[in-house]
Image: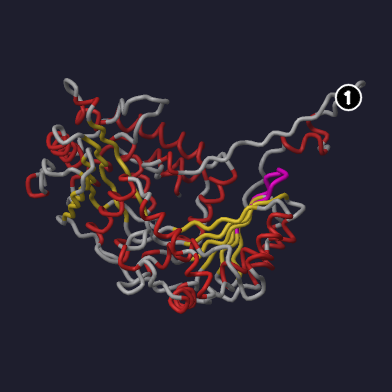
């Protein structure tokens, strides 16, 4: 349910421009068919069909017919930085970078040539609990290119010379990380230490140490559980596709993680600003009521501006940056991330050195005190319902939504059920969630004036 946790850095996402093909008008236009005639000319206006979900060899298969010219196919695998060890940190990032190299049945040149000849896009995305391989193409070309999802998911060979050729890209990705991404990695490290605390980026001392053997061993040890999701494809064919994958027939035993409240990490740099993250334990995917409650707390606190170039108005955190000149020198907004057995809910602060102390103390007080009213609840519910509708309106957002749900829970929660859960949450539920939390903290940048965690309200 990624729609419930909008990114704290929306500008980090790559936005693809809509391609529009136009035609000259005919000299004598034929009579337009009626919208209900089902003709190809009106195929763009046919709504989505109901979602279909099946189980094949412990693989959850979910698909929806969108009645659009484009089709998408994605395999979500239960892997990610959470499953790394101290000796293999950063291997997930290297796996993502190596997507597109040679496999057991195809060379790098052949794969790229075939994908480009069919006008397809192949992407790999990673998180702390998943690795996803997605291909997008015209539905008439999917039969030719869907094999590459399987190739890169399960049959990549990681030739040593190809892996070493991509080390500069890994080094570049580390170097261009924005401060917002760095502070989010620090707060996870502070709150979870290991497991969910392992970074999505390779540590500096591991650059050049991700060998071909390490990558193959990680795939062999962790690519054991998966889900398949698609839009614009035949569901019965997807079931056959899933049946050909050799996955574990038993659910994977994932070591439990622990949230460490009261911990703090600080990293001082020459930056002109201070970046601070304060967090308490949120909710896991499996506890749907608490999961929805955490999402509502996120929006009641304030998840950033809702209008272009707007301020974080309406949220309770707006009080932390109120005052003469403070709103121009600091910002404070909420964030949340949810995982299979835990979650993190907190506040992200960007401020100048002269205002960071006051803003941090006020934000910590607001986060831990609760005090959500019925008006806060009503506003948060309206925003959450809108966020879910907007996130799932596009095929890409919808694919990601059902992909994570099927992978981490084995099922898909319908929009009607989600709306019912949202309506069932009370202001008391929200206050209970935050008041029982224990604070963890991370800071980055020019942090000389950032208060330590023992100086903040518990």
Q: Is residue 304 visible?
A: yes
* x 13%, y 42%: residue: 450
* x 64%, y 64%: residue: 148
Q: Is residue 63 visible?
A: no
Range of residues picked out in magenta: 62-72
Q: Is residue 63 magenta?
A: yes
On the image, the x and y values in percent for residue 376 come to: 30, 30
Q: Is residue 22 left or right of residue 446?
A: right
Regarding mark 1 in the picture, which secondary structure is present there?
loop
Q: Is residue 160 left or right of residue 286?
A: right
* x 28%, y 56%: residue: 188
Q: Is residue 244 left or right of residue 356?
A: right
Camera-side residue: 238 or 323?
323
Position of residue 348 relative to residue 53, above or below, is above
On the image, the x and y values in percent for residue 20 come to: 69, 33
Position of residue 381 relative to residue 159, above or below, is above
Residue indicated by mark 1: 26
On the image, the x and y values in percent for residue 451 come to: 10, 44
Position of residue 210 relative to residue 431, above or below, is below
Camera-side residue: 376 or 316?
316
């Amino acid at each position: 349910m990624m729609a419930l946790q909008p990114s704290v850095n929306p500008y980090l996402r790559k936005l693809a421009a809509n391609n529009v093909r136009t035609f000259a008008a005919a000299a004598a236009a034929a009579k337009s068919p009626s919208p209900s005639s089902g003709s190809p000319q009106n195929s763009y206006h046919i709504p989505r069909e109901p979602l279909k979900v099946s189980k094949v060899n412990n693989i959850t298969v979910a698909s929806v017919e969108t009645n659009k010219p484009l089709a998408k196919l994605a395999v979500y695998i239960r892997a990610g930085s959470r499953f790394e060890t101290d000796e293999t940190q950063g291997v997930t990032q290297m796996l993502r970078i190596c997507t597109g190299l040679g496999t057991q049945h195809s060379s790098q040149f052949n794969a790229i040539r075939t994908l480009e000849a069919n006008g397809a896009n192949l992407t790999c995305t990673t998180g702390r609990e998943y690795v996803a391989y997605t291909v997008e193409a015209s539905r008439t070309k999917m039969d030719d290119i869907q094999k590459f999802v399987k190739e890169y998911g399960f049959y990549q060979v990681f030739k040593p010379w190809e892996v070493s050729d991509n080390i500069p890209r890994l080094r570049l990705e580390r170097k261009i990380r924005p401060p917002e991404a760095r502070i989010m990695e620090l707060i996870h490290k502070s709150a979870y230490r290991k497991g969910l605390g392992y970074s999505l980026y390779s540590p500096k001392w591991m650059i050049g140490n991700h060998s071909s053997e390490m990558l193959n061993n990680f795939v062999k040890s962790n690519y054991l559980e998966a889900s398949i999701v698609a839009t614009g494809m035949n569901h019965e064919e997807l079931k056959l596709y899933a049946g050909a994958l050799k996955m574990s027939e038993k659910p994977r035993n994932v070591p439990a993680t622990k949230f460490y409240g009261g911990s703090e990490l600080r990293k001082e740099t020459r930056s002109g600003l201070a970046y601070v993250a304060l967090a308490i334990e949120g909710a896991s995917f499996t506890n749907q009521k608490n999961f929805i409650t955490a999402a509502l707390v996120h929006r009641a606190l304030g998840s950033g501006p809702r209008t272009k170039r707007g301020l974080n108005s309406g949220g309770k955190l707006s009080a932390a940056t109120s005052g003469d000149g403070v709103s121009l020198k600091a910002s404070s907004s909420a964030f949340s991330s949810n995982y299979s057995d835990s979650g993190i809910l907190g506040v992200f602060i960007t401020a100048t050195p002269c205002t960071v102390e006051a803003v941090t103390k006020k934000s910590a007080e607001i986060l831990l005190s609760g005090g959500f009213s019925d008006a806060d609840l009503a506003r948060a519910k309206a925003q959450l319902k809108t966020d879910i509708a907007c996130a799932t309106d596009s095929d890409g957002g919808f694919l990601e939504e059902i992909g994570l749900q099927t992978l981490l829970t084995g099922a898909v929660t319908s929009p009607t059920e989600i709306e019912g859960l949202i309506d069932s949450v009370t202001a008391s539920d929200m206050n209970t969630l935050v008041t029982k939390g224990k604070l963890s903290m991370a800071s980055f940048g020019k942090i000389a004036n950032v208060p330590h965690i023992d100086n903040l309200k518990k």
